[in-house]
């Protein structure tokens, strides 16, 4: 079990990081969000052209088949850059759902379009929906990137349905959200035609997505720590850099420890994606560690910046907002902690019975 990226993935990471740094330098994301430009279509096309959207999609469906390790690496870098593109919604969620649970016809139809960026997908979990004769009725809220998506994977109890969002029976309304970079929407379905994913298992899908998005959280935590360290080195008080003060050192050290713990759990999660016996425990551990690390890093980044840290002009609050949104979009830490305890108890009971 290798708790790190391979050499090939590390080499690719350097290129991904360089491109993102050039496209989204410090302050650029906030300026775009202030201007209401929350989706960079030009960069989305660029990412598709570089093959980033299809790294984990098989070649027969228009992807590069580089595996989930590379997908997780790109998710980490996207999270660090706060890139204003629907990578999480379309690739980590919608494409993952279709790849794992879609029929051959569904995968042949939609995966090439998702890999090329021609189609944008989203996942609609929260909200009550009823299904009658292949049509869906109800409201899903909030749906991240639901205002720009072309298709939605809609959860109905323990089933999953694919809905094309250009139908007259679908109404979309952008809603205010904590995250300034991503736009959320209310999807109102009034008899929208839907196609069921016959093999869908929502619990399994949620576990897989939790691991993939843990890397997005790890990237955000890393960026928050880097921002705090950079400021602490440059900011002088009483004749010396505040990075030399013990109180600041303790804050940064606590964040570093939380980040490394989250990274280790996330790497374990990647291994578990192909070894599904360990998946429930690995997913819960990765989700909890990544959520706590990003929340701590974003909070302490603001604290290290002092009085200016919470101001609109500073960039700290963008990561704080993203950390808080990611902390709840797949269920709270209490939900995941309970799931982890239940799985560990079950494993212990099974082991005791076998003995």
Image: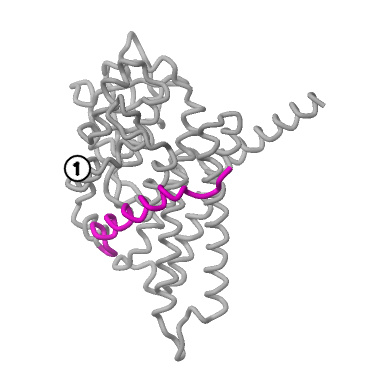
* Residue located at (47% from left, 62% from top): 299
Please state the extent of the stretch shown in magenta in the rendering.
1-27
Residue under numbered circle 1: 45
Q: Position of residue 72 (x, y in %)?
A: 42, 43
21 drawn magenta: yes
Q: Position of residue 267 (x, y in %)?
A: 52, 45
96 relative to 69, above or below: above
Q: Residue lying farthest bottom?
A: 239
* Residue located at (46% from left, 69% from top): 303
* Residue located at (26% from left, 21% from top): 109
Nearer to us in this view, 346 or 53: 53
Nearer to us in this view, 111 or 198: 111
The type of colouring in the image is: one colour
Q: Residue lying farthest right?
A: 355
296 relative to 355, above or below: below
Nearer to us in this view, 280 or 9: 9
65 drawn magenta: no
Q: Secondary structure at mark 1?
A: helix
Principal SS element in the magenta part? helix
* Residue located at (47% from left, 81% from top): 242
Nearer to us in this view, 113 or 144: 113
Q: Is residue 90 at least partly visible in the picture?
A: no
Q: Is residue 81 left or right of residue 339?
A: left
Q: Is residue 132 left or right of residue 199?
A: left
For the residue carrying disc 1, how many other residues have a C-alpha within 10 Å: few (<14), some (14-19), or many (20+)?
A: some
């Amino acid at each position: 079990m290798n708790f790190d990226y391979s050499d090939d993935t590390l080499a690719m990471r350097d290129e991904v990081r360089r491109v993102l740094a050039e496209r989204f330098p410090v302050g650029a994301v906030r300026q775009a969000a202030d201007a209401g430009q929350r989706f960079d279509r030009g960069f989305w096309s660029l990412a598709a052209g570089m093959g980033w959207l299809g790294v984990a999609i098989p070649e027969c469906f228009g992807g590069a088949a580089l595996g989930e390790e590379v997908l997780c690496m790109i998710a980490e870098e996207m999270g660090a850059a706060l890139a204003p593109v629907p990578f999480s919604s379309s690739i980590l969620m919608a494409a993952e759902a279709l790849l794992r649970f879609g029929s051959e016809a569904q995968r042949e139809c939609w995966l090439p379009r998702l890999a090329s960026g021609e189609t944008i997908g989203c996942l609609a979990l929260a909200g009550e929906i009823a299904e009658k004769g292949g049509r869906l009725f109800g409201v899903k809220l909030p749906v991240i990137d639901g205002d720009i998506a072309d298709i939605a994977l809609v959860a109905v109890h323990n089933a999953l349905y694919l809905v094309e969002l250009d139908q007259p029976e679908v109404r979309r309304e952008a809603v205010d959200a904590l995250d300034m970079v991503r736009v959320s929407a209310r999807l109102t379905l009034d008899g929208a035609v839907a196609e069921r994913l016959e093999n869908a298992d929502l619990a399994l899908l949620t576990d897989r997505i939790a691991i993939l998005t843990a890397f997005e959280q790890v990237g955000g935590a890393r960026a928050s720590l880097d921002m705090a360290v950079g400021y602490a080195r440059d900011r002088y008080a009483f004749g010396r850099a505040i990075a030399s003060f013990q109180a600041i050192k303790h804050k940064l050290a606590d964040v570093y420890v939380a980040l490394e713990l989250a990274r280790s759990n996330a790497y374990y999660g990647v291994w578990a994606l192909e070894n599904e016996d360990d998946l429930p425990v690995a997913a819960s551990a990765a989700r909890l560690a990544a959520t706590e690390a990003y929340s701590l890093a974003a909070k302490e980044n603001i604290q290290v910046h002092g009085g200016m840290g919470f101001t609109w002009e500073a960039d700290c609050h963008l990561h704080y907002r993203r950390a808080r949104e990611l902390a709840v979009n797949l269920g709270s830490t209490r939900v995941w902690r309970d799931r982890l305890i239940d799985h560990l108890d079950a494993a212990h009971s099974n082991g005791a019975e076998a003995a």
